[in-house]
Amino acid sequence: RFDGWLCTKSWSPFLVIAVQSLLYYGRFAIIALGPLADDTRFTRLAIFVDVVTTCADTYELAHAYLWGVDPGTWTLFQYRAAAYTVSNIGLQGCLLAVMCHTAASTMQRNMWVVVRLWAWSHIWIGFVSTSLVSAECHRLSCIVSWNAGLAVVVIWGSCPQLRCRCQEFLINSFERRSEARAAAGVAGLIGNCSVHDVMAQAGSRFRSVMLASLSFADIKDNAPDLALAAKTEKASPGTCDAFVSHSWHDDPCAKWNALQEWRGEFVQEHACEPGVWFDKCCIDQNNIEVDLRCLPVFLHGCRKMVVLCGVTYLKRLWCIMEIFTFIHMCRGLDCIEFKMVLREGREIEDSAAMAEAFANFDARECECFSVADKDRMLSIIHNAFGDVVNFNREVSAIFEQANWQEVCLVRSEGRERRAVTNAMGSSSSGDSSSSSSSNSSTLEDDGNLERRRKSWRMLTQSPQ
């Protein structure tokens, strides 16, 4: 004898049972997304949680349908509950065996095999019981909806790429939220306001500018130019290609060349012009203080940080605070790119000066327009790292891992070789004697490049 709701014609029981099934079986998908591929301890914890919850479900199922019932009087539901109980006990034993593996990847792979087989056994049990109930009702019974959650588990367990994508999405979401909170925390400390206020202000004030729309005259100095605001547009977090960090005290021509070099590389890689956050364009000149307070959040809203590093970069405290925010957000080195600002013809001199600045870097020696701002920012660094010395090590490590010496060397050699190529082109119309002279000159220039390479490395490494 079956209750009326099992044979109902209404669609609502189908929907209710399907939702209950998704919630019941969905726990396997949610719990299994937690551990990373190499996290053995967390993988064991996730499997153990599955075992405990399945034990509780098995106990409740047996208590509700089997205990105190004479096997001779069992109905379809008692047989169905008994089959589910045996399947659950098998799942628990297999998962306990899986926990004995030492490699996290092996545990996760075997766990999904076990869960998939367990889900298939429940599907077959459900198929048989649904067929019998539907035959009694003379129509499809609503308990067929219980297989909805099982189908999801089977699909989830059979598609490792889908699991990886979902796990990556969740990790990135948490990381972005964590980065945003970290950036807002720095901004709140700088501006003496709450994190909530900073987030609200930064969301409405974040802007970007297409780098192709700027000229050298626009960035040669930091004199206010209200007309530049018309070239910017409102941006959403994650849509701005780069945050340009630079010092206004570095040579403007060299800085422009470095910026255009990065722009050319970006266009070649992405086949589009970059949109960037550049302070002179994107800071509201009528409300500079508020935008400076939001600076760390603006940095978080950009996909990467481009550092135009010249001889004065490490001497400016606001530049160092941008590096501090980058470190505090725990972003990887793939999100920061360095372009060395080297004056034409004085590359070795500038590179040696930067090598000395790196070797003797101390945030306490950086310059800031306001003494009060300097004291507050150094206090923030001290609280975050325990000591300014630890922060100095972090900054130096970033530049060392970025191989800034090689960046300087390659850029200088590129200029030298372009000069040699141009010289060869200008002399190509001469006779054979001039051609021979050109070849000799080329060999001599190559020798000069090699000597310059050695002397450059000696100069840049000597202060260290």
Image: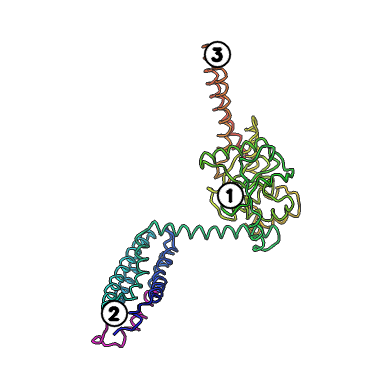
Query: Label 2, label 1: how many angstroms apart (C-alpha)?
Result: 61 Å
Apparent side of residue 409 relative to residue 45 in the rendered image (left or right) = right
User: Which is more N-terminal, label 3 or label 2?
Assistant: 2
- Three-letter residue code for mark 3: Gly
Name above or below for residue 106 compared with residue 432.
below
CA gap, disc 1 and disc 3: 51 Å
- Give residue 24's quadrant in the image: bottom left
Where is residue 398? Give x, y as percent. Answer: 57, 47
Residue 333: where, in percent of width, then height?
54, 48
Which mark identifies residue 137?
2
Q: Nearer the viewer, mark 2 or mark 3?
A: 2
Q: Which residue is mark 3?
A: 430
> Does residue 452 lie above or below 68 as drawn?
above
The stretch of residues the image draws in magenta is 53-78
Packing grade of label 1 (10 A; few <14, some 14-19, many >=20) is many
Q: Would residue 175 appear left or right of 254 to someone viewing this image?
A: left
CB atoms at circles 2 and 3 under 8 Å apart?
no
